[in-house]
Image: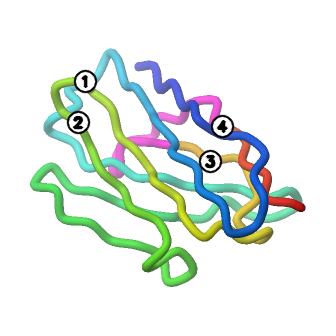
Amino acid sequence: VQLQASGGGLVQPGGSLRLSCVASGIDFNRDSWSWYRQAPGKQRELVATITSSTLTRYADYVQGRFTISRDNAKDTVYLQMNSLKPEDTGTYYCKPTYRSYWGQGTQVTVSS
């Protein structure tokens, strides 16, 4: 199983980024998918989840600002991040919600 996350970068507060995660070696369509993040010195935390039927759930700290979506034809899950705040800084990872596979993550830095 390979999970290739991309789309991170440096952005000013209030800005936007769109993260992508391409999965291979796994039956993408059947799984729920989640985005996690980890800030320096902190534990990894759940950001958002999308089920196989496209139901979505968000952590309170990103509700209304982030949107998770999926494209089954491309085996890809996305995270649209708007109104970014400095506390959103961290490494973002995607994973199948109920399986223990992790990719290398993509770094997001929100700073002026």
- Badge 1, how many Cα within 10 Å: few under 14, some, many 20+? few
Q: Quadrant of residue 96?
A: top left
**Quadrant the C terminus occupies:** bottom right
Give the CA distance from mark 3 to mark 1.
20 Å
Residue 96: in magenta span: yes
- Badge 4, how many Cα within 10 Å: few under 14, some, many 20+? many
What residue is pinned by disc 3?
92
Indicate whether 23 appears above or below 25: below
- Of the image marks 2 and 3, the number of the one nearer the N terminus: 2
At label 1, the amino acid type is: Lys
- Badge 3, how many Cα within 10 Å: few under 14, some, many 20+? many
What residue is pinned by disc 1?
74
**Residue 94: % across, % down:** 48, 42
Please, what secondary structure does the residue beneath circle 2 have? strand
| In contact (CB < 8 Å): disc 2 and disc 1 | yes
At label 2, the amino acid type is: Asp
- Of the image marks 1 and 4, the number of the one nearer the N terminus: 1
Q: Which residues are magenta?
A: 94-105
